[in-house]
Image (cartoon, helix red, strand yellow):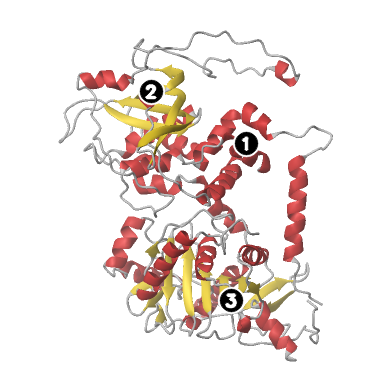
Amino acid sequence: MYVAVKGGERAIENAHAWLAEERRGDTGIAELSVAQIREQLSLAVNRVMAEGSLYDPDLAALAIKQARGDLIEAIFLIRAYRTTLPRFGASEPVETDEMVCDRRISATFKDAPGGQVLGPTFDYTHRLLDFKLAAEGDLPDAPEAAALEAAVPHITGFLNREGLIQTEDESDATPPDLTREPMELPASRALRLQSLTRGDEGFVLGMAYSTQRGYARNHAFVGELRIGTVEVEMEVPELGFAIGIGEITLTECETVNQFKGSKTEPPQFTRGYGLVFGQTERKAISMALVDRALRWKELGEDDVGAPAQDEEFVLMHADNIQATGFLEHIKLPHYVDFQSELELVRKLRREAEGQEAREAAE
Amino acid sequence: MNEYNFAYLDEQTKRMIRRAILKGLAIPGYQVPFASREMPMPYGWGTGGVQVSAATLVPEDRMKVIDQGADDTTNAVSIRKFFERTAGVETTEETGRATLIQTRHRIPEETLTEDQILVYQVPIPEPLRFLEPRETETRKMHALEEYGLMHVKLYEDISQHGAIATAYAYPVKVEGRYVMDPSPIPKFDNPKMEMAAIQLFGAGREQRIYALPPWCEVVSLDFEDHPFEPSKAEHDCDLCGAGDSYLDEVIVDDAGGRMFVCSDTDYCRGRRAAGHVGAQGVPYEEGAA
């Protein structure tokens, strides 16, 4: 006798209980604290903040813990939480010119005002497993230098003085917000940048890499990469002026790209721009390359049909929460659709077999 | 759970969604862009339907949620629980008692009335998507009523297979104007779409809402010499004996044995309660599976 499957509710509850147990792992091992994740897995925290579009290291660390280290799942937790938050207003644009830099490098000039500051980078580490880290131990203090007093001007600003790099149009227009309005295409550059900065790191990296390998090749120099803290200011209506409400860490990348000139533009360098929450330089550089590739139309370049030039393709597929949701939903029950396909294939096969039999008889 | 607003979404968001719904009802079959929110369940799990339901529910509603026609599939259970927690509305498995039904992939067998709303979860709202991947192009095609590509596709099916090889999400034309995706319901359900209830379609990830007001003309695309045919398994339900309901095929043993049962679990239960017994069924007992 067949009994229909029931008990979805109990199955779900039990699955959640099991999941919680698996998340905790062996209880003989000390539990990871949110503060430990925030301090010691900070690059994971940064990625979750950047793609979650919410600057809150503690919540990002909590999300990583809850998601068992699955960063896309953690980003999803942050996004879902972020949606419910009330919006009090918008900050003033941050001044990255005034960034207090931990790291600032230029690949285009050997030296420049503000200097080259390597900062805490993996760049020149030899990727040898450090077995000392497997044992707990104290860390020797890193040497310290006095903080830079002078301002650290943008490298592209120097190029601009000679008119060698294309000037961006200034605008005070309120940028669009794809979390509040449906995506409209063609998109403005501001909307593209918003989409890229919260886009999946792997996707944006792959797109950027494809431009380096010749799909809409536009050789990029890292004019400048800077990582540091900026002050966030907000105008309070009761006061009538802007006050500082906090500091955030940002990674900014400006690329300088070769450019021969076009029907509408004289020969000059052009820019790609990346700005991402936290220390996230792979993402910021990738973003700048993809931004530059997407600018072909406004710079009067040819559409060579490369994926990274295709705004709709890039913007519609950059979001990992959308992508993973739709991809994984195919594991949900589809037996009604499948049944209709079964009937159709059986019918078509019956007809095809009938046809063959008739032909054989003739 | 009081930390969230009634039915989870804030009132401004609901207002934005209701506007999209009203626009959709005013232009039947037209896909209205809306600023879909990130919901606490994944895209692909019914976030569009959930947002439409959340914007439509009132405290007096009695809600039913089905997936594949069944009330007890895991995701239907999960969505029903979500609204029990966030809206505190009464829920039911009985089609006739529900005022709002959220569904994935099926239309209930029982005829719906003008006092009911049917909310569909939609994965890809664009019926032309698999012929033309670009949204910028398909919007133009709808604007210009340029549906030739779709007819060519259906014609090519006939020339290759002798029949239109679309079994679910079978495209329809609404009020002689917009070609619309009915969501992945089996084509068996297509004729039911001309109904007394309001039908609302929500696609969260794709940020689209569309709608059918009551008794809207909904025509499944076909050709005069190859008319549309709704189809189902050529069996009766083995539990309740129904010959008019859409059936699921269930594999029951290792030897290829199978049986056919109603996909609409409430319909099947109701028939068995009324004394109908199928070929492999047993008399109905209250509370038994």
Q: CA distance from mark 1 to mark 2?
A: 28 Å
Q: Is residue A15 left or right of residue B210?
A: right
Q: Is residue B89 left or right of residue A243?
A: right
Judge the density around disc 2: few (<14), some (14-19), many (≥20) Cα neighbours within 10 Å: some
Q: Which residue is mark 2?
A: A98
Q: Quadrant of the N terminus of chain A?
A: bottom right
What amino acid does circle 2 point to?
Glu
Indicate whether A46 appears above or below A178.
above
Tag shown at residue B60: 3
Badge 2 sits on which subunit? Answer: A
Q: CA distance from mark 1 to mark 3?
A: 40 Å
Can you tell which quarter of the image residue A70 is in?
A: top right
Q: CA distance from mark 2 to mark 3?
A: 56 Å
Tell me what residue is drawn at x 72 percent, y 91 percent: B274
Badge 3 sits on which subunit? Answer: B
What amino acid does circle 1 point to?
Ala
SS type, badge 2: helix
Q: How many marks?
A: 3
Q: Which residue is mark 1?
A: A61
Residue A230: % across, % down:
44, 27
Residue A209: % across, % down:
43, 32
Q: Nearer the viewer, residue B88 or A176?
A: B88
Can you tell which quarter of the image residue B144 is in?
A: bottom left
What amino acid does circle 3 point to?
Glu
